[in-house]
Image: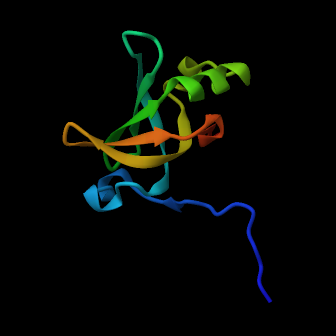
């Protein structure tokens, strides 16, 4: 008998444990959004996430930003709050980053 899950939870990881070995993996990280910056064109958003073990940049591209706004969310509302994010690990200029795949990839934690 086979059972199929409609959604597989990504593995929870601490920022200090993210390395080049994780590039391409989809992971979940819980932490506090410390800063938010928009790109010069306003098409992308960069958030800094701190989970107490380290910091990582979250990248939200234009299509995901539009999804968030269409759902009534303002990215600035996440600043200073604890969130759980799901993203794909990439590397840019020797730094590890998380790219959010869609508007459901960031959730406020109470």
Which residue is pictured at 35% across the width and 46% down the height?
A: 90
Nearest to the observer: residue 28 or residue 62? 62
Looking at the image, what colour scheme do you see? rainbow
Which residue is pictured at 39% across the width and 49% down the height?
A: 89
Residue that sits furthest to the left in the current view: 94
Residue 72 visible in the displayed image: no
The answer to whether 88 appears left or right of 22 in the picture is right
From the top left corner, tell me how far across and down residue 32 is, in percent.
47, 36
The answer to whether 89 appears left or right of 96 in the picture is right
Classify 4 as above or below 38. Answer: below
Image quadrant where one finds the C terminus: top right
From the top left corner, tell me how far across and down residue 40 is, in percent.
36, 10
Classify 44 as above or below 87. Answer: above
From the top left corner, tell me how far across and down residue 7 is, in percent.
70, 60
Residue that sits furthest to the bottom in the current view: 1
Nearest to the observer: residue 5 or residue 81? 5
Residue 48 picture quarter: top left
From the top left corner, tell me how far across and down residue 27 is, in percent.
48, 55
Residue 96 picture quarter: top left
Classify 105 as above or below 48. Answer: below
Which residue is pictured at 43% across the width and 32% down the height?
A: 59
The answer to whether 67 appears left or right of 21 in the picture is right
Image quadrant where one finds the N terminus: bottom right
Residue 9 picture quarter: bottom right
């Amino acid at each position: 008998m086979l059972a199929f899950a409609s959604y597989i939870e990504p593995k929870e990881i601490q920022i200090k444990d993210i390395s080049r070995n994780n590039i391409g993996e989809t992971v979940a990280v819980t932490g506090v959004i410390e800063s938010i910056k928009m790109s010069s064109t306003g098409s992308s958003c960069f958030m800094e996430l701190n989970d107490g073990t380290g910091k990582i940049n979250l990248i939200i591209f234009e299509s995901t930003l539009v999804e968030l706004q269409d759902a009534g969310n303002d990215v600035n509302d996440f600043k200073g709050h604890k969130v759980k994010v799901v993203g794909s690990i990439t590397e840019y200029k020797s730094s590890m980053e998380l790219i959010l795949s869609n508007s459901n990839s960031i959730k406020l934690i109470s």
